[in-house]
Amino acid sequence: MKILRNRLSSALLVLLGASFITFTLARVIPSDPALAYIGPKATAAEAAKLRITLGLDQPIPVQYFKYLIETFQGNWGYSLSTKQPILQEIADRLPATLELIFFAISFAVIFGVALGVYAAKYRGKFQDSLIRIFAIIGVSMPAFWLGLLLQMLFAGRLTWFPATGQFDIELKYDHPITRVTGFPLFDSIITGNYHATFNGLHHMILPALTLSAYSFGLLSRMARANLLEVLSQDYVKVARAYGLSERLIFFKLALRNALPPIVTVTGLSAAYLITGTFFVEQVYNWPGIGSFAVNSLLSIDYPAIMGITLVAAIGYLVTNFIVDLIQSKLDPRVWMK
Amino acid sequence: MKFLFKDKLTSMASTLLILFIFLAIFGPLVAPYPKEGRGKANVDNSFIGPGWKHLLGTDELGRDLLSRIIFGARPALLIALAVVGFAAVIGTLLGLIAGYRGGWIDSLIMRVSELFLSFPPLLLSLVAVTFLGPGLVNALIALIISWWPWYARLIRVEASIVKSKPYVEISAAMGVPDRVIILRHILRNVTTPLIVQIAADLGTVILAAGSLAFIGLGAQPPAADWGLMVAQGRNLIFDQWWISTFSGMAIFLAVLAFNILGDALRDHFDPRISRQ
Amino acid sequence: MSTVLKVSNLEVDFIAAGTVINTPLRGINLEISSGQTLGIVGETGCGKTLTATSIMGLLPSSAIQRGSIEFAEHGLVNAADMADIRGSEITMIFQNPQSAFNPIFTIGTQLHMVAVRRQIARNKIEQLLHARLRSVGLNDVKRVMNSYPHELSGGMLQRCMIAMALISTPKLLIADEPTTALDATIGHQVLGLIRSLQQSEGFAMLFISHDVSAVAKVSDVMAVVYAGRVVESGPTQDVMNNPQHPYTKGLLGAIPSAKKPRGELTAITGNVPSSLKALTGCSFAKRCTSADAQCLGEPPIIQIKEQVIACWKVAP
């Protein structure tokens, strides 16, 4: 329990810090929030009046404090561009992004780790080199470029997949998804709307692949390196000396030992995925937080940017927490600390 | 230096990097259409596909794409060097102070670093450049702000490891002044991981800068910035595919080369795992 | 008394890119009878551990082994035969107990894995493991079985390792520097434990250490190894009281003893020759105070009563 309390308090501190930095950047850097709100055509008087209304004439600490209180109360402000409540915008768009991230990370973990293990087993041979090349390519590819390439090749030239969007537009009329949890793909499965499920998956494949590339490369490199490190440890030599079969050693022992760092890297990848969605959703017109974030940034939508930063930071913290939880199950040494 | 060419992959990467540096320095001299590379439009020639006259085709303003890409090498390399350079210097200084001094200065610097690092990567840069205003210099500043904590933490960890090593304690006991201890022992041990990190980061920064430009928050037209060029060709990807494809490939190859180099450096300095 | 292990002219080369880069073992000869302990003593790097690894058949593919190994009723065995024998008839305990156990599994699980490998009946395993742990002096059996390696002390872990080694009631136990990583008093206890277990269970033992006094305490017969060759061997008492080879004399003279009068400890000048260069003649010649031109040739094997010495300067 004490560990939990410590984690929560440090998480809170991090959130406070993240919001403070963003807030400071927004207020301290020379660009006028009021002007951005009403546009450059406003007169000086209008701008001054707006400044008072928005509370921008107050000293910064007061503004920040006010912001904190409002945020806790659930009032995250209104988007300057869409004029909708920020919290609502985020809540509407979060499921689409979460589903995308889920598929991307699943793909990255399953294939990344599997290939990394395979490469470790056939170390030095042709398969190993091939996988390592794939991995380093994955890590080096710009997400937006990969997205465009896949779009052009598989949607444009080969028309195997749709180019943009989460579902076919007609789906809303032909096979509308009944809202249960708010997660479209998940809802379509539990309501038996398989037509929608297949359509959604069809749309999901290219964006998910694009988003997963970096994590895939990272994970396969890590899995390979960790496994090789574990295999060179004393306890593996001892196991061999006691006649345990290579198969047992490789699959049961070494893999279990190599898992903890892999779990950690998965958590780190999740962070990368969060900002990765910005680019992938833009390219594929995915109705999630990523595209909302890009639009907010380009239109300097202050409240929206603050909201998104908060959500991103929360997401990062939650992921790390889950990772640590899994770690403590896998590695008794961690838990003992 | 031999390890730079130890196998086919590393050789290819090293060659690419040499080419990259060459183009960054001598680009304007070798580009087939230098004026267009710099930005001069030639609208009659718009959207010509790859061919003999224009090896990689032309863009929406009729400019030879190959020349534009060549001209893009210099800013890409300069950004990478500037960001990593400044971030490494600032971060190393702060990390050394934190690691060696310990105490409240250590805590302060590390808390601030961790705060910055708790942002998902790139997010801080995106937010910072948004408020600074789009543009190359602002993108530079934003990236430096996000990058220095990595170095501060890396150096601080190494510094505190080295600080507790016997030979440093002995030096201190013999009255060797602090500054000298830091310089001699800590810097020497810190150099290797630092070099490996810098090599990898050069690639990552090019990627980040390209991403910023793609969104529209980095270099602005008519600059020959690779990320910007990918964005400009974005809506034309199905028909005039060469614009985004080749510009993006430039980014990809540069990042790939740096990553492979980073791997080679790491293997060279710490060959425990890679070779038996 | 039957011979449990006989090693003849064991040589090991390491190759890289088709050529020999290293010859760490240049001709080892050992013989152990059942119930007997042979102690191998020598400096770090002289090839002691490598000898054990070779006997077990665990050399990497970059190594070439020459010479013969005969084990118990099996007669001549090669590395492939060893794959079945090791872990059952020959077992080994290692220097660093903390790293020898897998950190993420409990001791019980790891002992269990070994027992299963030895095809001990499932319903008998628990009982057997408990008895084994008690036999090595660990009475709080349940706690030990449920502990992770990092929760136990070095001494306790070493006892666990001994227990693990004896699960299969081996004919030969190889102990590679078992007390080096332990505190002096604990190490002493562990040595005593090993010796008493040997007496009650009757296995033969190959005891490897750089600590001459430990070897002397535990071994019936001892062999002194230098630069990949056995330079002197014989019954422990004889070798300790009457060393013949210059290296042995130097080694024994370097031991501080409460019994010896105050005086200087001998220091052998020079360094162990690198195994990278091919050695001809006596490997100790360069550091030997009695060496001369004769020592450039391969030294003859001299036998004095039950001692065997490889030296030019020893009179039979």
Image (cartoon, coloured by chain):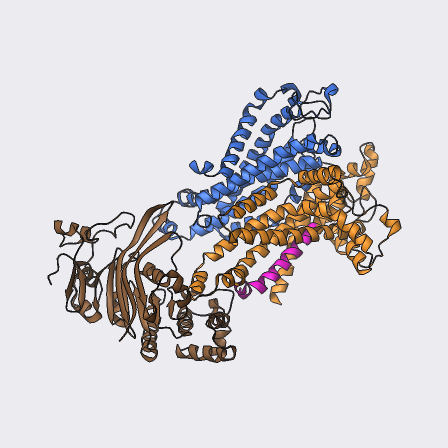
Chain colours: A orange, B blue, C brown
Q: Can residue B191 be seen in this view?
A: yes
Specify the quadrant of the image occupied by residue A296: top right
Left or right of C112, for residue A304: right
The quadrant of the picture occupied by the N terminus of chain A is bottom right
> Relative to A325, is C256 on the left or the right?
left
* B185 and C26: which is toward the camera: C26
Residue A29 visible (yes or no): no
Image coordinates of residue B98 in percent, x first then y, are 50, 48
Give whichever of C274, C83 is nearer the camera: C83
Residue bounds of the magenta highlight: A312-337
Q: In this view, does C42 lie to the left or right of A147?
A: left
Q: Which of A220 and C250 is in front in this view?
A: A220
Name the residue at 34% across, 62% down. C55
Q: In which quarter of the image is residue C85?
A: bottom left
Residue sitting at x 65%, y 34%: B248
Q: Is the magenta stretch mostly helix, strand or loop?
A: helix
Instruction: Measuring from the top left, give residue C218's x and y in whole percent.
Output: 28, 72
The structure residue drawn at horizontal position 15% and vertical position 52%, both measured from the top left corner, is C295
Q: Say whether residue A331 is magenta.
A: yes
Q: Where is residue C135 in the image (x, y as percent from the top left)?
A: 40, 79
